[in-house]
Image: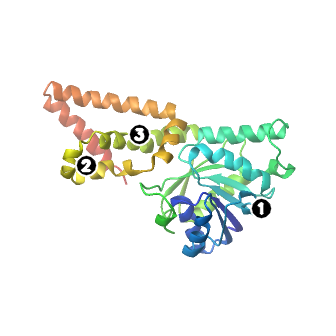
Amino acid sequence: MVCQNVAIIGVGLIGGSIGLALRQRGLAQRIVGIVRRRESVDDLLKRGVVTDATTDLSSGVAAAEFIVVCTPVDSISRYVLESARYCPEYAVITDAGSTKARIVQEVESGWTQHRIGTQGDFSSASATCRFVGSHPLAGSEKSGYQYAHPQLLAGRWVVVTPTARSDAQATERVVAFWQALGARVQLMAPEDHDRALALTSHLPHLVASALAGILPPKWADLAASGFRDTTRIAAGPPEIWTPIFLHNRSALLEALGQFEQQLHRFRQALGTENAEMLSALLTQGKSCRDSLA
């Protein structure tokens, strides 16, 4: 058992899959899902995603030893700091956000201001609550706990992003938590994570959305498997991806610049009917794709 009490704030695809995995593996005695809508409380319990559910954050984290915030990235730091008001002083808090540097900075800044008494009305216990950022690389174009699966994280990578200010024991507990769910863990600096994910996740979503967005309705019936496979992730919820793009704006712009340079090379090869250059570019892409495990 990882711990007696786990709280999950935001029970969607990732949060729901965490809840189901904890239950299936017998890793927690009590798993509290904290959601916004009252109707979700009853449905989560009916589906067995969690053992308890509530719309009240303060009561939901009151006994939690481990807290995972699985909300959109633009609200994660707020929920982390709010949880720190009410959770036990020994609790560890992590998140599942697709961006890390800004979230970590906002959380650490919030705790710093709290400690010198310039922000919030946190309890004295909240100062000892420990946060270490995480990002499970196990998303989907589908959202909602209806699509959650207890094996979603099995064999998948989770990036954990401690900083110089992170409590070593908290980092160990976060790593152990994800490993207990069957995931593989890689430690990275928050900024390195964001540069990597800009290229491997955020840019692909942007490109898929751009490609899907230029399809004329009159040709939709001709969009076969190639188009559908390439644009599948464009079906992801805009309310989730808009803040991700904005949070990781600098790194995403850098990745977009690299992509534009590659597109220019393709345009140049086509414009000059340079078959050798075109073949080399296609070979490069195929080689990189084939190298993926």
The disc labelled 1 sits on which kind of residue?
Ala
Dividing the picture into quarters, in which one does residue 293 lie? bottom left
Q: What is the CA distance from the residue labelled 1 to the residue labelled 2?
A: 48 Å
Residue 182 screen position, x and y as percent? 53, 65
Say the numbered circle drawn on residue 159. none
- Do the CB atoms of the residues marked 2 and 3 lie less than 8 Å apart? no
* Label of residue 227 in the image: 2
User: Residue 268: in sight, yes or no?
Assistant: yes
User: Which of pointers 3 and 1 lies earlier in the amino acid sequence?
Assistant: 1
How many other residues sit within 10 Å of disc 3, few (<14), some (14-19) or many (≥20)? many
Q: Secondary structure at mark 1?
A: loop
Residue 262 place in picture, x, y as percent: 31, 31
Q: Nearer the viewer, mark 2 or mark 3?
A: 2
Task: Name the kind of residue labelled 3 in the image.
Answer: Leu
- Quarter-wise, where is residue 257 in the image? top left
Taking 62 as reference, is 253 left or right? left
Label 2's element?
helix
**Left or right of residue 49, residue 268 in this image:** left
Residue 188 in view of the camera: no
Q: Which residue is located at x 52 percent, y 36 percent?
A: 246
Q: Amino acid at mark 2?
A: Phe
Residue tagged by mark 3? Answer: 203
User: Between disc 1 and disc 2, whose residue precedes?
Assistant: 1
52 or 205: nearer the viewer: 52
**Label 3 to label 1: alpha-carbon separation:** 39 Å
Q: At numbered mark 3, what does the secondary structure look like: helix, strand or loop?
A: helix
Number of on-image labels: 3
Residue hosting label 1: 62
Q: Residue at x 53, y 41 (%)?
A: 243
Which of the pair 48/14 is nearer the observer? 48
